[in-house]
Amino acid sequence: MNKPVAVSEEVLATPVVAPEVGPRAAGVTGPAYIVLAAISVSHFLNDTMQSLIASVYPILKDNYALDFAQIGLITLAFQFTASLLQPVVGHFTDKKAQPFSLAIGMSSTFFGPLLLSVAQQYLVILIAAALVGLGSAVFHPESARIARLASGGRYGFAQSVFQLGGSFGTSMGPVLAALIVVPFGQGSIAWFSSIAFLAIIILWRIGMWYRPQIATRTMVRIEPHPDAPSSRRVTVALSVLVVLLFSKQLYVSSLSSYYIFYLIDKFGVSTQAAQAYLFVFLAANAVGAFLGGPLGDRFGRKIVIWFSILGALPFTLALPHAGLVMSAVLTVFIGLIISSTTSSIIVFAQELVPHRFGMISGVFFGVAFGIGGLGAAVLGKLADHTSIAFVYQVCAFLPAIGLLAVFLPKMPRHAR
């Protein structure tokens, strides 16, 4: 699903002329807080729309008698368009930045809920989900670039502010589904297009700020730091970071897509109560995503990566054996710890290959989406043949993959 991106040693090692995107280029001595807040709010609105897809699964399952494999394919349709196109968008905007592409891309997200609200066939549901994924594919690479441009040199902090909006947006989907879609039915999904319309307005204003930044950016020659890792180690490190993101995102995907069904099946709670429990996990996920970036700026990204992935392991192992209340408590710790790695992984990768910023951002955001979609489909098939409880017993061991962080190189002091 995610086509491998070949990054040769020659490309990694060769200095290139690239637009400067640090604080000097932005003309500020600190973060542009208004821009960071606006791009974070936009991320919130975008990911609220995304999370709505998974939150209405119980309704779609009942209305159309879907099995878990078909539920997984809906996630795959959404994630596939996002995964496939994000690296392409990032590679294109590396060459020529498009300040208003974010607002234009959000129009695809605008039409997705409208189509989903009137869908009467499974194929139409898949198309609606794919439209929302297409909007995300355009949004993430360029918005991550804007967050870095507005960072004032505090790259981890800026990435965390950006991720905070997305994480809280993800947590809002279950709440809005419980308050609006469950009582009013599938047709009420159309109202969520107003969220996308608001995002279009904000992103158009951000594009107006972004356009003169592009016009005034100076061109600098990026030379390798004397203490920077070799091109071979960079290639190994990028591979390790992809695998680490795999372990993190696949576990989060298992909770996002099937936790509602797990709680209903194991504890007999109502759909609305299960959505409330899912919100608790996703809210903790949002807080952890925000804390991870500043901690990476302060203590080093490699340390945060070690802690955030391996630190969640005891809690994920305990979750399949816990009662209802303790399950909620455990998911809070899991969300706080495991999500803190996202900003550090992305910024670490960006610093490994700074002259391919858009492409690297697109690859890693795309991998996250793609793994989530593919994993959801595979886990759904596994749940159909075994049980939801068995799926969580298997996924409990995923954070152990974090041991591969031992192969990450030591970065120069300026890029921690």
Image (cartoon, rainbow, N blue to C red):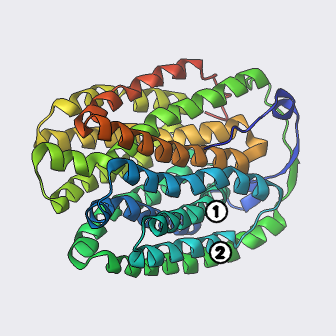
**Relative horizontal placement of residue 98, taking residue 415 as reference (left or right):** right
Say what amino acid the circle numbered 1 marks: Val
**Relative horizontal placement of residue 77, taking residue 53 as reference (left or right):** right
Residue 233 percent location from the top left of the image? 71, 21
Q: Residues within 10 Å of mark 2 (few under 14, many from 20)?
A: some
User: Quick check: can you spot residue 183?
Assistant: yes
Residue 11 percent location from the top left of the image? 85, 34
Residue 92 percent location from the top left of the image? 78, 57
User: Quick check: can you spot residue 36?
Assistant: no
| Closer to the camera in the image, 396 or 379 | 379
Q: Quadrant of the N terminus?
A: top right
Distance, label 1 to label 2, CA atoms, is 9 Å
Q: Which residue is mark 1?
A: 138
Residue at 40%, 28% in the rendered image:
399
| Closer to the camera in the image, 223 or 382 | 382
Residue at 56%, 81% in the rendered image:
201
Q: Secondary structure at mark 1?
A: helix
Q: Does the CB distance between marks 1 and 2 fall below 8 Å?
A: yes
Q: Quadrant of the C terminus?
A: top right
Residue at 65%, 35% in the rendered image:
415
Q: Secondary structure at mark 2?
A: helix
Residue 84 percent location from the top left of the image? 64, 51
Q: Which residue is mark 2?
A: 104
Mark 1 or mark 2, earlier in chain: 2
Residue at 72%, 70% in the rendered image:
99
**Relative horizontal placement of residue 305, taking residue 90 as reference (left or right):** left
**Relative horizontal placement of residue 25, taking residue 256 as reference (left or right):** right
Say what amino acid the circle numbered 2 marks: Ile
Q: Based on the displayed image, in which of its 4 quarters is residue 105 positioned?
A: bottom right
Residue 254, numbered label:
none
**Is 197 drawn above or below residue 24 in the view shown?**
below
| Closer to the camera in the image, 112 or 142 | 112
